Image (spheres, helix red, strand yellow):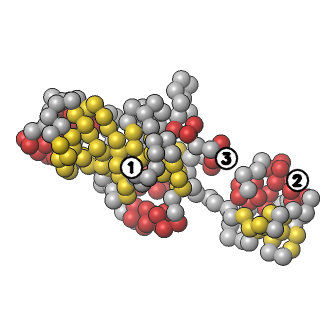
Amino acid sequence: MRIDKFVSDAAAMTRKESRKAIKSGRVSRGDEIVKDISLSVSENERILLDGKEITYKKYVYIMLHKPGGYVSATEDKRQKTVLDLLDPSYARYGLFPVGRLDIDTEGFLLLTNDGDLSHSVISPNKNVGKTYFVRLEKNITDREISLLENGVDIGECITKPAKVKRVSENEINLTITEGKFHQIKRMAKAVENTVIYLKRLAYGEFYLDETLEKGDYRELSDKEVENLCNVYKRK
Ligand code: URA
């Protein structure tokens, strides 16, 4: 890639700013000052701006604790989107949510620009479970729990087998591998109940970091990204 792109991506600059920085001698490759804005460099090269190394990131992975009131989309005419919760410097990465959560659903939302990972995590064929904490309006019986586990009729289909762990008389952790529109709310309806609170806890074995307050986010560590890609991209 051209060095002006490297610098603008790695240092959160506009292309115009990065070209100016290069021309004024603020950028070096290793020990050598670079003034040619069209110089070709690789992603892993040691590039410095004002003497400090800057690293180029192609893919970004963010764990967001989604609060209610935000739509899981990249843009919306009326509502705030989950991207509005991020620092504006992330705008240049073209991030999108990995699977949707309803506007009133809270919890773990991954945001990335890695289309392959996103596909692997949300494709129903890959059978990646998503676990939700579900609070219901009425108590749920063991029989209703086994109906949810075996699959219920939500109109457009019978849901695939799910896993349920009882939390209290009216609360369960429910793991599903599909992501039909309003799936959990419709599953609750199928057993004559209503969801009054919904929070995604995990994608597969990857759980929301509970130290993140609602509306907060953090980039995944290199180790977390490696695990995620190893587990899901190979599925
Ligand atoms: N199921 C729902 O009904 N809503 C969500 O946001 C996620 C799963």
Q: Amino acid at mark 3?
A: Ser
Left of 19 or right of it: where is 106? Answer: left
Rendered residue at 30%/34% (across/down): 197
Judging by the rendered image, the residue that carries numbered circle 1 is: 122
Mark closer to the chain start, 3 or 1: 3
Distance from label 3 to label 1 (Cα)?
Answer: 26 Å
Judging by the rendered image, the residue that carries numbered circle 3 is: 89
Distance from label 1 to label 2 (Cα)?
Answer: 42 Å
The answer to whether residue 195 of the structure is visible from this angle is: yes
Q: Are marks 3 and 1 in contact (CB under 8 Å)?
A: no
Q: Amino acid at mark 2?
A: Lys
Which residue occupies the foreground of this view, 203 or 69? 69
Name the residue furthest right: 24
Name the residue furthest bottom: 31
Mark closer to the chain start, 3 or 2: 2
Q: Give the numbered dot on residue 113.
A: none
Q: Quick one: quadrant of the N terminus? A: bottom right
Judging by the rendered image, the residue that carries numbered circle 2 is: 20
Q: SS for tag 2? A: helix
Rendered residue at 53%/66% (across/down): 222
Left of 63 or right of it: where is 41? Answer: right
Which residue occupies the foreground of this view, 226 or 53? 53
Rendered residue at 25%/37% (across/down): 135
Depth check, mark 3 against mark 1: the one in front is 3
Q: SS for tag 1? A: helix
In this rendering, the answer to whether 9 lies above or below 71 is below
